[in-house]
Image (spheres, rainbow, N blue to C red):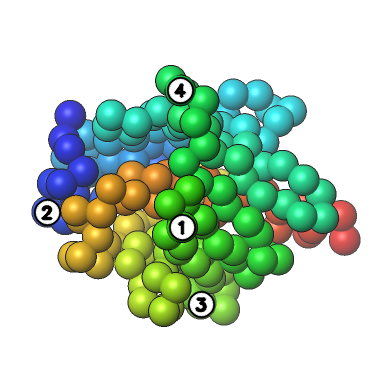
Amino acid sequence: MKVFDELLEQNLRWVQTSALKQDYELRTDDDEVLATIHQASMWRSMVEVEAVGNRWTFERKGFWGQHIEIKSVGTQAQPAVFTYNGMSGGKLTFIDGRTFKWKQSNFWGSKWGWATPDDEPIVGFKTDGLFKINSEISLDPGVVDMPSLPLLLMLGWYLYTLYVQDSSAVIVAT
């Protein structure tokens, strides 16, 4: 399995493993799996995330003040929290004070990404798919050594899948 330092040399993509499941794999050009996101239960919006050297759970909580609770599986420590800013994105805040913005990059909602507090894009997700959603990932060269890169890649994809679910629910309700 590759380490995240080698990511810049690869074309990365998120792939939904089945149209009937909310399970995803982060794959390289040669189909090597770098990470997985598995929905533990159909009735909860919690997922289990496994990446190189990292295991987390992400769970959406709250109604009016929605946020994502991020926990390390081994220690139950919470390295960061994501707070929503409506359907247009939100902010990830680490316990050491670092922040990143999550935002939509185009009108159609097919491009999302992480940006610095100064709005410099660092990780992008370009999505496609009708029955199964997939995404190509673009990385700014400066983020490869960033210790928070694995969390940004995993949480970003989880946030996009929640966006798709929420959008589908709105369409069905109307």
Instruction: Please name the residue shown 17% across and 38% down the image.
Output: 3
Q: CA distance from mark 4 to mark 1?
A: 20 Å
Residue at the outermost right position: 174
**The residue under label 1 is which amino acid type?**
Gly
Q: From the viewer's perspective, is the residue at label 3 or at label 4 nearer? A: 4
Q: CA distance from mark 1 to mark 3?
A: 28 Å
Please tell me which residue lies in front, 13 or 159. Answer: 159
Q: Which mark is residue 9?
A: 2
Whether residue 168 appears in this view of the structure is no
Q: Which residue is mark 3?
A: 106
Mark sitting earlier along the chain (1/3): 1
Relative side of 35 to 75, left or right: left
Secondary structure found at label 4: loop
Mark sitting earlier along the chain (2/3): 2
Residue 115 drawn at (x, y percent):
41, 69
Q: Are marks 3 and 4 in contact (CB under 8 Å)?
A: no
Residue 85 drawn at (x, y percent):
66, 66
Q: Which residue is mark 4?
A: 75
Mark sitting earlier along the chain (3/4): 4
Q: CA distance from mark 2 to mark 1?
A: 30 Å
Residue 117 drawn at (x, y percent):
44, 73
Q: Which residue is mark 1?
A: 97
**The residue under label 3 is which amino acid type?**
Asn
| Image quadrant in which the N terminus is located | top left
Relative side of 44 to 112, left or right: right
Structural crowding at the residue carrying mark 2, measured as other residues with C-alpha within 10 Å and reported as few (<14), some (14–19) or many (≥20): few
Q: CA distance from mark 2 to mark 3?
A: 26 Å
**The residue under label 2 is which amino acid type?**
Glu
Vertical relation: 113 (above or below) 52: below
**The residue under label 4 is which amino acid type?**
Thr
